[in-house]
Image (tube, helix red, strand yellow):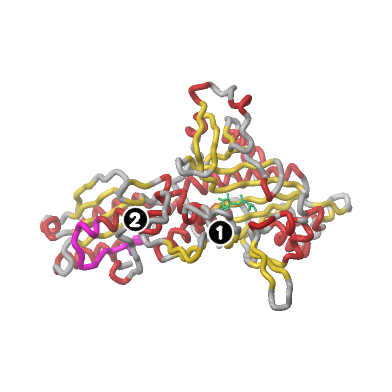
Amino acid sequence: MRLSRYFLPVLKEDPKEAQIVSHRLMLRSGMIKQQAAGIYSWLPLGFKVLRRIEQIVHEEQTRAGHIPLLMPTLQPADLWRESGRYDDYGEEMLRIRDRHKRDLLYGPTNEEMITDIFRSHVNSYKDLPLTLYHIQWKFRDEIRPRFGVMRGREFLMKDGYNFDLTREDALHAYNRHLVSYLRTYERMGLQAIPMRADGGPIGGDYTHEFLVLAETGESEVFYDSQITDLKFGSRDIDYDDKAQCQAVLEEFTSRYARTDETHDEAVFAQVPEDRRRVARGIEVGQIFYFGTKYSEPMGATVVGPDGARVPVHMGSHGIGVSRLLGAIIEASHDDKGIIWPEGVTPFHVGIVNLKQGDVATDSACEALYAELKARGLDPLYDDRDERAGAKFATMDLIGLPWRITVGPRGLAANKVELTSRRSGETTEMSPAEAVERLSATYRPVFAAGLPSPAA
Ligand code: 5CA
């Protein structure tokens, strides 16, 4: 993309309404625009990161054997009357009435609707196990929407639902989600720690939240510091292997890690004092096992092996897709702006032309731009007629992990500069070497994905 033709409405001033750094940086770098309290337009740069995050989520769900579909945002109230949640959900639910006076609601989550799909089409235990998911907008009329996309009213969520014959199978689905979530967050450059939590309005007493440690997090968390040494890495997991998935769950949940809702001082006191941590965290996902809470009242049953109908065991599993942008920025920024992890960056590299209009410099930039694209990279070329300082400031603000700086003086010796946004380190090299270096840097990032697009 050429910056002269892009739409990147960066703000010079710090917006007053932003209380935390991620919200401030998302507004300043022209990623989002607020349209009403907790409701945002996603401008091109923000939309690009949102799409990259979705892609990682799709790939990791596919890897785990889960199947994408798409349910609507508007749901009939009658479905929610069947489960009893229409009245229970309270004021967070946005209720709508259509011209025929039928009650609808803007879905805050989809347990009822997916259960309805299941009961309409699945009849036998032979069709299990089944896990369906979608990435869809949700609405929760939060009393205090704040911190930008972190606590929105309209927000994008990945929500997945497993259907299993037995509790044991459903717990395997739970473990499978835990494993795939660990991998998902790490690909986004995040450490998200599974912590024992509370079921809230979704229900169930077996649930973990995934928390990214950050001072601005809304949840208070208590944990054994050893847990932060755990890395999932590039393990090769067979998601159908129950023992393997269970072992990962045990490894990542055996140390003390709880949110304030389930925190137990007496148990926490058994952690050696020098390892006890009290901190704050951002909840970027949650997994639940709730058995037959929805399948029983809604009649989602299958014919079991002995011929009798039994309600299926279910769980639901959510990732806060739009919230993740805020969480990543909270975890990765400096006083100049965002520092995108390579897995989610909107553009892989920025090209800064120090002397726009100079024939040699322009043509070197054009050649770099073409060569990077030919290598499958997505460069942003700042071809505007601006001062170098302004170009650097924009690149730093929007946080691309790499910058190539091209100027007439360097080019005279066939040199450009490659700068790392994170370390600030700059190295001189030939344009060809810069392309080589960047391709090599992104090779493992691409290799972490699936070879073919997921959904
Ligand atoms: N049905 C279940 C799992 S699919 C469910 O709704 N779970 S949830 O309530 O925990 O939401 C899943 C994730 O959505 C949360 O972990 C959080 O990351 C994100 N989320 C929840 N509320 C908001 C909000 N108001 N703004 C942005 N993200 C949110």
Q: From the top left corner, tell me how far across and down residue 51 is, in percent.
A: 47, 61
Residue at x 46% of width, y 52% of height: 326
Residue at x 58% of width, y 62% of height: 136
Query: CB of residue at label 1: within 8 Å of ligand 1?
Result: yes
Residue 384 lies, with reference to residue 294, above or below; the image says below
For the C terminus, the image quarter is: bottom right
Query: Rounded to the nearest whole Å, what is the CA distance between mark 2 and mark 1?
Result: 23 Å
**N-terminal-most mark, 2 or 1:** 2
The residue indicated by pointer 1 is: 153
In contact (CB < 8 Å): disc 2 and disc 1: no
Secondary element at image label 1: loop
Instruction: Please tell me how crowded label 1 is: few (under 14), some (14-19), or many (20+) other residues with Cα within 10 Å.
Output: many
| Rendering quarter of residue 348 | bottom left
Residue 235 lies, with reference to residue 23, above or below; the image says above
Examine the rendering and report whether any part of residue 417 can be seen. Answer: yes
Q: From the top left corner, tell me how far across and down residue 291 is, in percent.
A: 75, 47
Q: Is residue 17 magenta?
A: no
Q: From the top left corner, tell me how far across and down residue 164 is, in percent.
A: 74, 50
| Rendering quarter of residue 270 | top right
Residue at x 69% of width, y 52% of height: 162
| Extreme residue toward the bottom, this view | 99
Mark drawn on residue 14: 2
Which segment did they paint magenta?
A: 373-392
